[in-house]
Amino acid sequence: MSKISVIVPVYDEEENISPLYSEIVSRLNEFELVFVDDGSKDKSWDKIKEIALKDKRVKAIRFTRNFGQTQAIKAGIKNSTGEVIVILDSDLQNDPADIPKLMAELEKGYDLVSGWRKKRNDPFFTRVLPSKIANKIISFSTGVYLHDYGCSLKAYKREIIEKIDLYGEMHRFIPALCSYVGAKISEVEVNHRPRIKGKSKYGMIRIFKVILDLLTVKFMGNFMTKPIYFFGIFSFGLISISSLFFLITLYNKWYNHIFVKDQPLFLVAIFLSLAGLQLGLIGVIAEMLTRIYYSSEKRDYYIKEKIL
C-alpha cells in the first residue's frame, strides 16, 4: 500500500504524546506522522518537538492559539504527503493497532473507512447515549448510515479528503461530506480504550453544536452551489399562501361585505408577502456570496511553528 500519513490533532495531552508515538511506530512500517498542536497550554508542544527532532518521519505543527480540531485536521492534511490519510485522537482511546485493519478495508475499493467503537469505554449518560442519538439523527438526515460518526479513527484516500472544504467543527461530518462528492464508504469495528491520562475536552454543549452543524451540512450537501433554490422554495411558498389570503380577503369584501379592516387575515397576508420577499432577496444575496466563496482564498488558522 502507498505511504500512510497519520494525523494526530493535539490539545493539552502532554502525558499521552510519547506513548502514542511508540504505539504508532511499533504498528506501522512506511508512514509519516503529523502532530498538530492546537494551541495547547501544557507541555504538549515540547514533547512533540522532541520527537520530531529525533525522528524524520515525524512532522510537527503548532498553532498560534486553539482553532479547533477541524482546523488541526485541515492543517495536517495540507502538510502531509501520503496517499492515504489516517486520523486518530491523541488521548490513547483510539488504538493504533486498528490502523492495519482500516488499510485492509481500503484495499477492497473503498474511499473512506470509518471506525466503529462498538464497545465504548465512556460514561453512558453523558457520552454514549447522546452519541447514539446523534448518530441516528445524522444518519437519517444525511442518508449516510454509520454507527459511529464520533469516532475519530478513520482512513481516507487523499483524492477524496482533499475535495472536502473543512471549516468550523465539520470534522464530525466528514463521511457525509465525502459522500456528497461520491465517496464509497465502509465501517469496521475498532477497539476503544478507557482514558487513563488527561481530561476529556467534550461536554454536553457538543449536542447543540452537532445539531447546528448538521443543518449546515444538509444545506451544503443539497444547496451549496444553488442557495437560491433553498430560499426560493420558502419564498415561493409564503408568497403563495399570502396570495391566497389576499383572495379570501377580497372575496369577503365583495361578496360578504366584510370590510378589510375587520379581516385579520389581510394583515397576515401582508406579513407573509413581506417575509417571502425577504427570503427571495436573501437567496439572491446567498448566490452572490457563493460566487465570492468559490473565488476567494480562505484561511481559518495560523501556524506559529513547523518542523517538517
Image (cartoon, grey):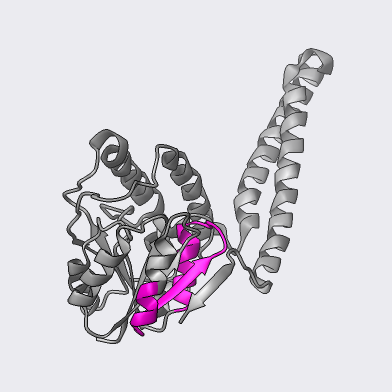
Residue nearest the viewer, comparing 122 with 266: 122
Q: How many marks?
A: 0
Q: Residue at x 25, y 49 (%)?
A: 195
- Counting from the top left corner in percent of width and height, residue 260 is at 82, 18
**Visible residue check, residue 275:** yes
Q: Residue at x 24, y 37 (%)?
A: 124
| Placement of 273 over or under 144, stated as above or below | above
Q: Residue at x 25, y 55 (%)?
A: 93
Residue nearest the viewer, comparing 219 with 91: 91
- Quadrant assignment, res 90: bottom left
- Counting from the top left corner in percent of width and height, residue 14 is at 36, 59
Q: Is residue 43 magenta?
A: no
- Counting from the top left corner in percent of width and height, residue 55 is at 33, 82
7 displayed left or right of 162? left
- Quadrant assignment, res 81: bottom left
Q: Is residue 53 magenta?
A: yes
Q: Provide the residue span drawn in magenta.
A: 50-79
234 displayed left or right of 26? right
- Quadrant assignment, res 65: bottom right
